[in-house]
């Protein structure tokens, strides 16, 4: 799922958020992500096999609960790094009796916004 890196107010899909938060492995990953980490670091910190970690990272990204950036390395072997991209998840019932999902996020720094844009460009090429 390719998101507009500058669209911070895009509403996530309710079912994707609920599914991700209901998954014990996804919750373990969110708990382990105290700082940005690579998939292998997350796998080790959360004691989840690497192949499973990648699937759970995808699920958390689709639910818009993770931010994927790029760690630039001097050797040219850049790596994806992940960090939690929410402070609060709110599920409300609207006047039309429909569920609405809202994710409170910390404001992104200009560096993070540029990193998002660069990551999306890399995915498209």
Image (cartoon, rainbow, N blue to C red):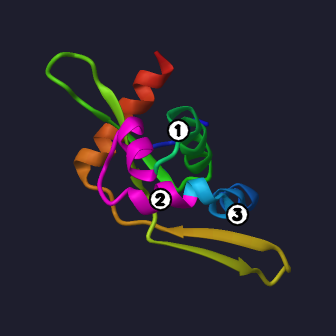
Dot 3 falls on a residue whose secondary structure is helix
Relative to 121, 74 lies left or right:
left
For disc 3, the neighbor class at 10 Å (few under 14, some 14 to 19, many from 20) is few
Residue 11 in sight here: no
Decide whether the magenta segment is chiefly helix, strand or loop.
Answer: helix
What residue is shown at x 56% (from left), y 32% (from top)? Answer: 51
Q: Which residue is tagged 3?
A: 18
Q: In the shown orientation, is residue 83 left or right of residue 103? A: left
Give the residue at x 47% y 59%: 30
Magenta range: 27-46
Q: Which mark is residue 49?
A: 1
| Residue 108 versus residue 125 in the image, above or below | below
Residue 103: percent from left, percent from top: 54, 67
Q: Quadrant of residue 99?
A: bottom right
Q: CA distance from mark 1 to mark 3?
A: 23 Å
Q: Residues within 10 Å of mark 2 (few under 14, many from 20)?
A: many
SS type, badge 1: loop
Question: Which percent across, then down, holds residue 121?
Answer: 42, 25
């Amino acid at each position: 799922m390719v998101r507009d890196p500058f669209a911070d107010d895009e509403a996530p899909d309710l079912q994707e958020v609920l599914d991700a938060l209901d998954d014990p492995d996804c919750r373990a990953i969110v708990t382990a992500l105290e700082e940005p980490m690579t998939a292998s670091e997350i796998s080790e910190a959360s004691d989840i096999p690497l192949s499973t970690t990648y699937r759970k990272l995808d699920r958390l990204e689709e639910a818009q609960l993770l931010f994927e950036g790029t760690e630039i390395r001097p050797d040219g072997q850049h790596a994806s790094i992940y960090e939690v991209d929410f402070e609060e998840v709110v599920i409300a019932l609207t006047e039309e009796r429909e569920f609405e999902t809202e994710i409170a996020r910390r404001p992104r720094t200009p560096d993070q916004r540029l990193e998002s844009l660069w990551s999306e460009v890399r995915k498209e090429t």
